């Protein structure tokens, strides 16, 4: 299997980490002609023999289903829905909250210089992290329950981004403990924390 996209992309990192968790052999390249099959021209794109697929969270589900990674994505409908709900929440709510602040603070993109929007995004980002904190307090372990699941890949990478962005953050003890639990996973160290134990 080939994964197309730079390893610095949070969405590419999702797929790389999932492959490591499942044990899927892959080759990653920065660019490839298959990118044209994504109408948005975004990464990642995977090529699995003659099948080309884009959208990182869809790729996560595909990989877990194809390789029967039931510990990551259960078959039982309610448990599966709980995992999928957090995958979707990361894409729709968590990502939306941090996009402006991250673009301004870390990427220093000149199109993101509005101080009010930066502060609004930072505040919303902290509010989303507090939602994660409350969920982790309720589960006592990981985002969708006591055990690590596929949902922890996108959530964990978003938490990593929140932790390393130089901005004011509230103290969230359950998020801190979660971050350390994730650090026991080689895939997170490699693709999330950049090898920093």
Image (spheres, rainbow, N blue to C red):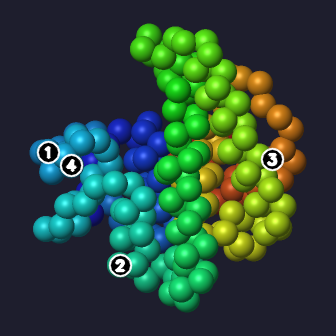
Quadrant, the N terminus? bottom left
Q: Is residue 178 above or below residue 115?
A: below
Q: Nearer the viewer, residue 85 or 184?
A: 85
Whole-angstrom CA distance, mark 1 to mark 4, is 5 Å
In the rendered structure, find residue 36 and report the number of the disc placed on it.
1
Quarter of the figure with residue 142: bottom right
Judged from the image, the secondary structure of the residue bearing numbered disc 3 is helix
Whole-angstrom CA distance, mark 2 to mark 3, is 33 Å
Instruction: Return the x and y of residue 113 as percentages of the image width and height.
Output: 52, 11
Quadrant, the C terminus? top right
Between circles 4 and 2, the one closer to the viewer is: 4
Q: Residue at x 25, y 60 (%)?
A: 53
Q: Is residue 38 left or right of residue 149?
A: left
Whole-angstrom CA distance, mark 4 to mark 2, is 21 Å
Q: Which residue is mark 3?
A: 176
Judged from the image, the secondary structure of the residue bearing numbered disc 2 is helix
Whole-angstrom CA distance, mark 1 to mark 2, is 24 Å
Q: Which residue is mark 4?
A: 38
Q: Is residue 106 above or below residue 183?
A: above
Q: Which residue is mark 2?
A: 66
Graded by Cα atoms within 10 Å as few (under 14), some (14 to 19) or many (20 or more), the crowding at tag 4 reads some
Whole-angstrom CA distance, mark 3 to mark 4, is 36 Å
Graded by Cα atoms within 10 Å as few (under 14), some (14 to 19) or many (20 or more), the crowding at tag 3 reads few
Q: Is residue 193 visible?
A: no
Labelled pair 1, 4 in contact (Cβ < 8 Å): yes
Judged from the image, the secondary structure of the residue bearing numbered disc 4 is loop
In the rendered structure, find residue 115 and report the number of the disc placed on it.
none
* Labels 1 and 2: the sequence-earlier one: 1
Instruction: Return the x and y of residue 89 as percentages of the image width and height.
Output: 56, 56
Q: Nearer the viewer, residue 106 or 69?
A: 106
Judged from the image, the secondary structure of the residue bearing numbered disc 1 is helix
């Amino acid at each position: 299997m080939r994964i197309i996209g730079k390893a610095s992309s949070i969405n590419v990192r999702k797929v790389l980490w999932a492959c490591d968790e499942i044990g899927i052999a892959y080759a990653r390249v920065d660019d490839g002609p298959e990118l044209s099959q994504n109408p948005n021209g975004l990464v990642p794109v995977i090529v699995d023999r003659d099948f080309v697929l884009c959208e990182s969270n869809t790729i996560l589900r595909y990989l877990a289903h194809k390789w029967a990674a039931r510990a990551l994505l259960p078959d039982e409908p309610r448990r599966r829905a709980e995992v999928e709900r957090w995958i979707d929440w990361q894409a729709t709510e968590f990502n939306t909250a941090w996009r402006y602040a991250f673009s301004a603070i870390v990427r220093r993109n000149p199109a993101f210089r509005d101080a009010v929007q930066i502060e609004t995004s930072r505040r919303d980002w902290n509010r989303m992290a507090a939602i994660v904190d409350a969920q982790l307090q309720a589960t006592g372990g990981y985002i969708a329950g006591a055990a690590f699941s596929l949902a922890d890949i996108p959530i964990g990478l978003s938490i990593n981004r929140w932790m390393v962005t130089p901005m004011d953050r509230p103290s969230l003890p359950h998020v801190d403990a979660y971050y350390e639990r994730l650090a026991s996973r080689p895939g997170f160290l490699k693709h999330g924390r950049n090898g920093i134990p």
